[in-house]
Amino acid sequence: MKITVLYFARIKEAVNYSTEELDLPNDILTITALKNWLALRGEVWANLFNGKQVVRAAINHNLVDDLAKIQANDEVAFFPPVTGG
Amino acid sequence: MKITVLYFARIKEAVNYSTEELDLPNDILTITALKNWLALRGEVWANLFNGKQVVRAAINHNLVDDLAKIQANDEVAFFPPVTGG
Amino acid sequence: MTVRIQTEDFDVGLLLNQLRLANPGAGALVSFVGQVRDINDGDSISTLTLEHYPGMTESALAAIKAEASTRWDLMDSLIIHRVGTLKPLDQIVLVAVLSAHRGEAFKACEFMMDYLKTQAPFWKKEITPEGARWIDAKLSDDAALKRWNK
Amino acid sequence: MTVRIQTEDFDVGLLLNQLRLANPGAGALVSFVGQVRDINDGDSISTLTLEHYPGMTESALAAIKAEASTRWDLMDSLIIHRVGTLKPLDQIVLVAVLSAHRGEAFKACEFMMDYLKTQAPFWKKEITPEGARWIDAKLSDDAALKRWNK
């Protein structure tokens, strides 16, 4: 299925771009699965998504935990813990 | 001993003045004793100081309870519970 | 550290900016503004008159500020309270607290208001279509104060 | 009920007056202003840049306001948050809550700030003499949030 992925803050700087369109393999159905799949892209990605640092996720503008299910056309965002205010 | 007594808000309106100089009998040494002594002045005073309504007291600008001791030249104030803010 | 009792209105924006800009190490400014409501206990309010005890008021408010400063790490604070005759929508009081972080500023500002409501010698009399009446102290204000007992 | 994300500065005095004067039944206005501190973690700050997630930010802040309104009896509230590059003493955020009585306004304002700090997608990067660094989220903010669990 096709989804849009956005990256913010230090994650955006590390991957060096802010958004991409992805066509996910059939078995990538949750945030955890997507993180593990992205971690296979190379060292930078592995460092971000191997679970050693906290990466928060949102689906369609809602904060979700890693068990959340991804659906076709979702907008998925990855970012560090927020620090506004 | 001589003291100054101030009245505020609805107590001032009831007694119809805001301040007086008093020369207390020797046995009037606490706020309670002063209230009881003032209550002897007549019906208005009895209604205020017979203990049926809450009358707060201050000595020299400090809120005190009724057991507080009065000394010569003190400024004693009587007023209803406060309602600022 | 300012305490003011005055009949004139005050400019909240100006006062908060002064407090804030004088303290570049402060990250958090919490403030309370009290205004005269147009309706109280079901009756419309024409005017609200605030009486106070000159001399004691200033020392009570200074004591409240000093106590807040011993309990929390504050960079500055401000209390301005009006007296005299006000009308609905007039400002009555401003309490503002500046701190490095927000938790202390929120606690100190609410503490100062709870103390002010129960310890500072102000009394309110309102004029309604039914006539004049003194406002009674609220039991809820005494309850609010008790939360701060150490 | 206003939520605004903007690069421009805002006028706290004007905004608080508008909120207050539109609600003559309100007696209590509590507000929080956050400013850029000149020193953070021991280093002087040249600039602070706020990044956010357009679209999600607005909906997160609207959700925070809505949740506060279900928990407390509020007459109005306001959140304004700046993004872009700021310098020390610049205002970052204003949260203001208007209610009939002060207890609810204090609680709701602090609740909204605690939620904003932990749930709204903003990130801060500061420039110091040592270079640029992203600010880490604070454990104390997560702890502050947990107090509000029902």
Image: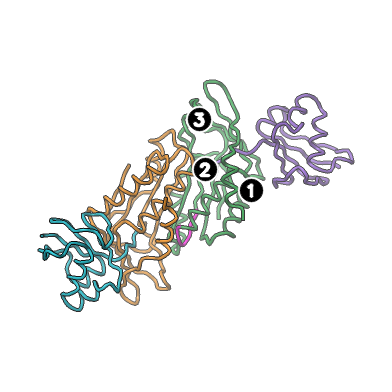
Chain colours: A cyan, B purple, C green, D orange
Can I make out residue B2 in this image?
yes
**Tags 1 and 2 touching, CB below 8 Å:** no
* In front of the other: A71 or C56: A71
Q: Is residue D90 left or right of residue C56?
A: left
Q: Label 1 near label 3: C-beta < 8 Å?
A: no
Give the CA distance from mark 1 to mark 2.
Answer: 15 Å
Q: Label 2 sits on what residue type?
A: Val
Instruction: Name the residue that disc number 3 marks.
Output: C40
At 28% from the left edge and 72% from the top edge, which residue is drawn? A51
Q: Which residue is mark 2?
A: C93
SS class, disc 2: strand
* C136 to the left or right of A64: right
Q: Chain of mark 3?
A: C
Q: Earlier in the sequence, mark 1 or mark 2?
A: 1
Which disc, if any, is residue C60?
1
State which quarter of the image contains the N terminus of chain D. top left
Q: Nearer the viewer, residue C99 or A18?
A: A18
Instruction: Out of A13 and B9, give the one closest to the viewer.
Output: A13
Residue A22 lies left or right of residue C74; in this view the side is left
Q: Which mark is residue D10?
A: none
Span highlighted in magenta in the image = C97-102
